[in-house]
Image (tube, rainbow, N blue to C red):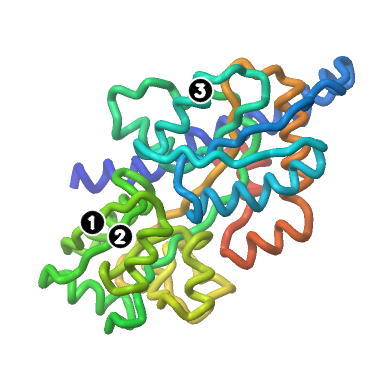
Amino acid sequence: MVEFEMMREILARRRTIFSLFHTAVLACGFGCMDLASAQPQDLYPSKPIRVVVPYPPGGSTDIAARLVFQRVAEIIKQPVFIDNKSGGGGNIGALEVARSAPDGYTLLVATTQHAINMTLITNMRYDVRKSFAPISPISEGPLLLVTGNSQPFRNVKDVIEAAKSGKVTFATAGNGGSVHLAGELFNRMANVKMVPIPFRGSMPALTDVMSGEVTVMIDSMLSSMPFVTSGKLKALAITSPTRSKLLPSVPTVAESGMPGYEVTAWNGVLAPAGTPPPIVARLNSALTVVLQSAEVKERFKTLGSYRNQTLLMDSEYF
């Protein structure tokens, strides 16, 4: 029971960083605009910006970053390139950004895992709450329990029955991330033992699920949804408290026999601590324009993700 409660607490740690984003948005909304008007931003940006995605290409974080920053580049009139620095559960890329000059030219796309790491790792070489200046959340969304077409499973009950006999493996995008802990939470609540198989990112993990090498995966809807809609994966359940309008026939894990099961994943943009407020304001403004555009909102919607407006406006959320 203690381990179960700890797991639930770890998954809830996303709110710690969410509160930082909330503070940044309020600050930019009420303070940075005046500061920006007092200090012209003609010199920023004056060169390309590097955005560190601390995971391999093709995963949910990479998809979100490329979707958003391609359009940010058009607004700020400077190239923005994605630098995939994977490894260490997202910590290698995060540490590099934390140690970078606070000048707005090196940014990090942080995820749920960076909040989780605060709990799981005792010798962190940076403090996610102190080493970064929050700029803006990008998206949040549920995960999907998916399996390959060669697997016999039709629903969560089938997976649980097979797992009781020790015949189920589940892919993860690395140890300790939201995908991994979502599977372990499933194990605890269903009282089964699916065996985790770690991969370096979602794309290689999903590939092995599609081929049948690994039985199932509970992956971000952002990265798994294209394979579901193309018929390459079967969606057995969704981890949100209610069904998705995109997949109305797919039940929630909670309604499939595990009441209370809920997992979401998020990502957002951070800069090194000490980045000047006018630069934070400039980046926040560009990101807000992009994320509120009809094109980007529709694209995220088709992938089952969204920008959490409650997060931006309601401090009680935290």
- For the image, the number of numbered tags is 3
Q: Is residue 318 visible?
A: no
- Which residue type does callout 3 highlight? Ala
Tag 2–tag 1 contact (CB < 8 Å) = yes
Instruction: Say which mark, if any, is on residue 98.
Output: 3
SS type, badge 1 = strand
Q: Is residue 157 left or right of residue 282?
A: left
- The picture places residue 316, in percent across and down from the top left corner, at 57, 38
Residue at image location 58% in from the left, 73% down from the top: 245
Q: Which residue is mark 2?
A: 171
- Which residue type does callout 2 highlight? Ala
Q: Earlier in the sequence, mark 2 or mark 1?
A: 2
Instruction: Say which mark, if any, is on residue 285.
Output: none
Q: Earlier in the sequence, mark 2 or mark 3?
A: 3
Residue at image location 89% in from the left, 21% down from the top: 37
Crowd tier of the residue under label 3, counting other residues whose Cα lies within 10 Å: few below 14, some 14–19, many 20 or above? many
Q: Which residue is mark 1?
A: 196
- Which residue type does callout 1 highlight? Pro
Tag 3–tag 1 contact (CB < 8 Å) = no
- The picture places residue 210, in percent across and down from the top left corner, at 36, 72
Question: Rounded to the nearest whole Å, what is the CA distance between mark 3 and mark 1?
Answer: 30 Å
